[in-house]
Amino acid sequence: MRKIFTLATLILCLALTATAWAESSVTRIKDIAKVQGVRSNQLMGYGLVVGLPGTGDSDDTWQMIQSTVSLLRNFGITVNSADLDSDNVAAVMVTATLPPFVREGDTIDVVVSSMGDADSIQGGVLLQTPLRAANGDVYAVAQGSVSTGGFVAGRGNNRAQRNFPTAGSIPNGAIVERTLEDDLGRNGQISLSLGSADFTTAARITNAINAAYGNVAHAANPGRIDINIPGYYRSNVVQFVASIEDLPVVPDNIAKVVVNERTGTIVMGGNVSVDECAITQGGLSIRINRTESASQAAPYSYGTSMVVQNTEINARDERSSSVVLPATTSVSDVIGALNAVGASPRDCISILQAMKAAGAIHAVLEII
């Protein structure tokens, strides 16, 4: 049976590498590296959302009961937890990301998520909640009206829900109370961290920086480059970093073929090289059919009729397609060779695996 060739996934591969048949294209240092120390920090806190229309936590949520009693006690109100029946309060966790270089008084967004059995926190108000970092210090305080972008209506089986009403956000809901120390370039040195550690790329970035500013850069390892700030830039580190980020460089990438077996997607890098090899596509097809018939006894005999199973075996050796793939460094030749074999996307995956096992393809084969 003739095979229908459907290599839509390899067309995607060709499109991705059409402009990258050279090893790599020129890019900015900013796009492949970042300055160490310029990072965000995660904050987290525990709080209460009040003002809910009966959709808060039930009496079985002990953390909400204890928190409410403690809150009221701080305001001089004594309440017995056994007498507290408040389903318009929900215990929540509040999370936020503290961007780099924020100052006291700046505002950041927060995410509020129910941690009890509340049905919805829509329309609730988050009470003042300290947000702590991993070291336990408070860096921001959150408070405000919660926006969920969803709702829940009805009860039991007659209930309609949209999105997730038990999680919401408060835009600009936290005020920064403490500034992180800005030590960028304080000791006369900055470091660049590569997004993907590579010896060749680190060496090229170092050479590009030294060509522009003298012998100021040194690659400590494949993932980090230490740079001494020139004296005339000591008072303007931001301008120095901006000028470095704009320097052009040609990154080096390892040859890689990424295969997604679930979707049949194949993506190849432009620097995949192939040795001479032969590919054969085809196989033996065997079909076995069983039919039943009745076997009648001869007249005037003592025999009985019985059912007989007839087996028919058909074997067919399909005509295989063969192609010799010459040694090449072009992805288009690889695609053309697979096209000539008449392989489907699933067949291409098997062919690539066999080529890798045979040592004919010089690339990392990654299956996801």
Image (cartoon, helix red, strand yellow):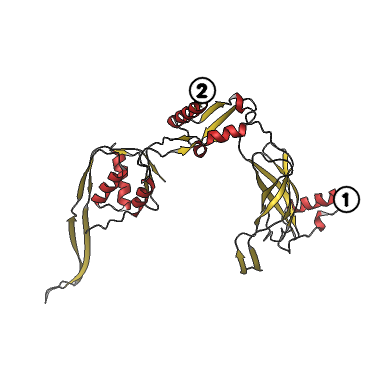
Residue 294: mark in rendering: none
- Closest to the observer, 250 or 233: 233
Label 1 sits on a secondary structure element that is loop
Label 2 sits on a secondary structure element that is loop
Residue 293 sits in quarter: bottom left
Label 1 Cα neighbours within 10 Å, binned few <14 / some 14-19 / many ≥20? few
Q: CA distance from mark 1 to mark 2?
A: 67 Å
**Image position, residue 9 (x, y; %):** 36, 52
Q: Can you say whether 153 is above or below 250 in the image?
A: below
Q: Residue furthest top?
A: 215
Label 2 Cα neighbours within 10 Å, binned few <14 / some 14-19 / many ≥20? some
Marks 1 and 2 close (CB-CB < 8 Å): no
Q: Amino acid at mark 1?
A: Gly
Q: Residue furthest right?
A: 76
Front tag of 1 and 2: 2
Residue 21 sits in quarter: top left
Quick check: 82 left or right of 243? Answer: right
**Image position, residue 110 (x, y; %):** 67, 50
Q: Is residue 36 visible?
A: no
Q: Residue furthest bottom?
A: 300
- Label 1 belongs to which residue? 76
- Closest to the observer, 49 or 316: 49
- Closest to the observer, 252 or 273: 252
Quick check: 197 left or right of 319? Answer: right
Q: Amino acid at mark 2?
A: Asn
**Image position, residue 39 (x, y; %):** 61, 38
Q: Can you say whether 348 is above or below 121 in the image?
A: above
**Image position, residue 255 (x, y; %):** 37, 38
- Label 2 belongs to which residue? 215
